[in-house]
Image: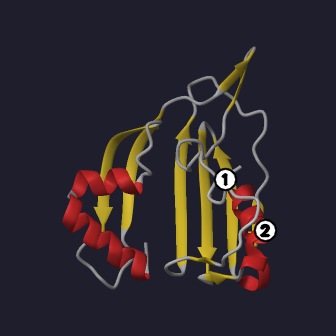
Amino acid sequence: LKGYPAFEGRIQYQQEGEDAFQRNQLLNNDNLVIESCQTINLEEQSKPLSLKASVHINPTAQKKGKKITFSPLAGLISDEPLFPEKKRLYPTQFPYRTEEIYMTTITLPEGASVVSLPEPMVLDLIEGAGSFKFQINQRKNTLTVISKMTLSETYFGNSAYEVLKQFFDLIFA
């Protein structure tokens, strides 16, 4: 977290305590079992506030014969759509610009092999108002997933709602 989100995160940490803050930052997700978690740069206001966590994701995989299919971001993103309405009469406003980076390492079980990986993805929101980048790499039995979402604008008129909804639907699909 950088800027205002980091400022609010530090206040949240002070008000709720370390455990509640870390659970909230990890989306308070029942699919995650937090094995260890460290808050980084809590006292250093000029640096981004970060979490370094080791979590176990309860399986959301689908098994077909000898193949297992799973989403590399399962358990890390919300299942609920950010914009469920088909149309919106009012503008959408976010409280501040934001940049969220998730780097996840997935260790495959011994003997498992990867049949296919998702293609890298780059999405750009209208007129440079935001972007999303996703990439997954494999090295032996370890997958490294990197995603970065940036919102450089905070205000979107109601005419931009459909494009904004589509952008977030593609990210969280």
Is residue 125 something that shows in the picture? no
- Amino acid type, mark 2: Glu
Residue 149: numbered disc: none
Is residue 50 something that shows in the picture? yes
Q: Nearer the viewer, mark 1 or mark 2?
A: 2
Q: Quadrant of residue 65?
A: top right
The structure residue drawn at horizontal position 63% and vertical position 28%, both measured from the top left corner, is 61
Q: Quadrant of residue 92?
A: bottom right
The secondary structure type at the circle numbered 1 is loop
Badge 1 or badge 2: first in the primary sequence: 2
Count of marks, rendered view: 2
Location of the N terminus (image quadrant): bottom left
The structure residue drawn at horizontal position 23% and vertical position 76%, both measured from the top left corner, is 43
* Residue position marked by numbered label 1 in the rendering: 172
Percent across and percent down for residue 19 are 25, 51
The structure residue drawn at horizontal position 23% and vertical position 56%, both measured from the top left corner, is 18
- Amino acid type, mark 1: Phe
Is the residue marked by circle 1 packed among few (<14), some (14-19), or many (20+) residues within 10 Å?
A: some
* Residue position marked by numbered label 2 in the rendering: 162
Distance CA(mark 1)–CA(mark 2): 15 Å
Q: Foreground residue, 141 or 15?
A: 15
